[in-house]
Each structure stands twice: as C-alpha cells, then as structure tokens.
Amino acid sequence: MTAAIEAPPVRKRGRTRWIAVAIIVVAATVLAVLLRGLGSGAPAKPPTLQNQLADRVAAILEQSTPAQHHDHGHGAVASEGAVLCAVKTLGFDPPGATTLAEVRIFYGNHLCAVAEPNRAWDFAVKLSGPLSVEFVEPAKIRVAEGGEGYPERVRDIIPAQYQEQAMLALVDDDDMRELRRRFDDAS
C-alpha cells in the first residue's frame, strides 16, 4: 500500500510536458515576430525630418515613369524593370521647417538602380548624383547630369552651404546595403 501512495501521479508528468511545449511555442512565436520586425537586420532609421524627406524623395523617384526619369535628366530607363532608390538628405528650404508639410524644396544625393530580370547589380543601369526636388504637383526634380560642366550644374541646383557635401558620398553605407538587398530581391 505504501508503494502506491509514494508513486507520483501520472497526470502531473503529462501537464509538465504540455507546459514545456507551450513555452517553446510562445518563445518561437516571439522570436519569429522579432526577426520579422528586424527585416534585413539593418538598424531602423529614426523618424527625423531628414529621414522622412529622404524616404519621400526615394518614393517619388521610384514611382516616376520612364518618361519622367528622362525629363529630369536620367536618360533612358527601361520600362520593364523596377527603379529602386536610396536618398540622402543634404538640406531643405525653408531651413527652419520642422514638418514634411513645411518643406518646399529638398536638396540631396540619390542612387537609383534599375532591377531588370536576370541582370546582376554590377551590370544594372544606375543613376546617381545630387538633386533637388520641389514639392509641387507633380514634383519638380532637377538632377545634375555628369560630363563636362558637372560642377556648374551642381551649383545651379544645390545651395552653397550643401555643395561640398553634394560632391562627397552619395548615400550612407546602411542605405547602400538596403538598396542592394532590395535590388537582389527584385531581380
């Protein structure tokens, strides 16, 4: 009789297994949500006005038709590929603006790549350089085209206080990695 009293109840062991399974399922779900939130692993950009403007200009460039790209100096852009862009904010007018709605003109650098089917990054059409965007409907985009007279064209569209930056790096390393990831996903 004492042997039957000392034996642990069978139910308790089954309950422990279910609790362990539930903990594992919850942990896996939390991990999946966290990994999805991290996306490519690149740090999320803080919601500063500069970052919001860069995102807005990138969206404008990406949604432009091939004819619109040609009109603002990008030359021929294939209609069959997606245009993907990264943009860096140099400044904006008026300089004291604190919201997107207050900004009239954007100044920055951009790098766009055309993701055509079966075309590797190294051989993709890429468009880059300083630009200004006037936020009217439709947006008025001005790009400094390369070639002879390039510095003068940059000076024509970028105010003096941003011209030195305009001649330096096009976009940040994190933005470049994200653009490359998006390109690889699209092509």
Image (cartoon, rainbow, N blue to C red):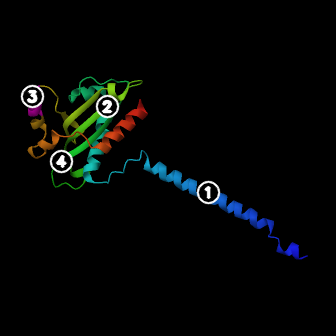
- Look at mark 4 in the image and give the residue it sits on: 91
- Distance from Cα at disc 1 to Cα at disc 3: 64 Å
Examine the image and state in which quarter residue 142 appears. top left
- Residue 154: quadrant of the picture: top left
The residue sitting at the right extreme is: 1
Which mark is on residue 113? 2
Secondary element type, mark 4: strand
Region of the chain picked out in magenta, as a range: 148-153
* Disc 1 element: helix
- The residue at the point 38 percent across, 47 percent down is 42
Considering every residue shown, the one lying at the far front of the view is 3
Q: Tell us which disc is closer to us: 1 or 3.
A: 1
Marked residue nearer the N-terminal end (1 or 4): 1
Labelled disc at residue 149: 3
Tell me which numbered mark, 3 or 2, is placed earlier along the sequence: 2
Q: CA distance from mark 1 to mark 4?
A: 49 Å
Could you give the CA–CA distance between mark 3 and mark 4, rounded to whole angstroms? 23 Å
Q: Which residue is under mark 1?
A: 24
Q: How many neighbours does mark 1 have within 10 angstroms: few (below 14), some (14-19), or many (20 or more)?
A: few
Which corner quadrant of the image does residue 11 belong to?
bottom right
Q: State how far apart marks 2 and 4 are (Cα).
A: 23 Å
Q: Residue at x 88, y 77 (%)?
A: 2
Q: Position of residue 30 (x, y in %)?
A: 53, 56
Circle 2: residue type: Ala
Query: Circles 3 and 4: CB distance less than 8 Å?
Result: no
Q: CA distance from mark 1 to mark 2?
A: 43 Å
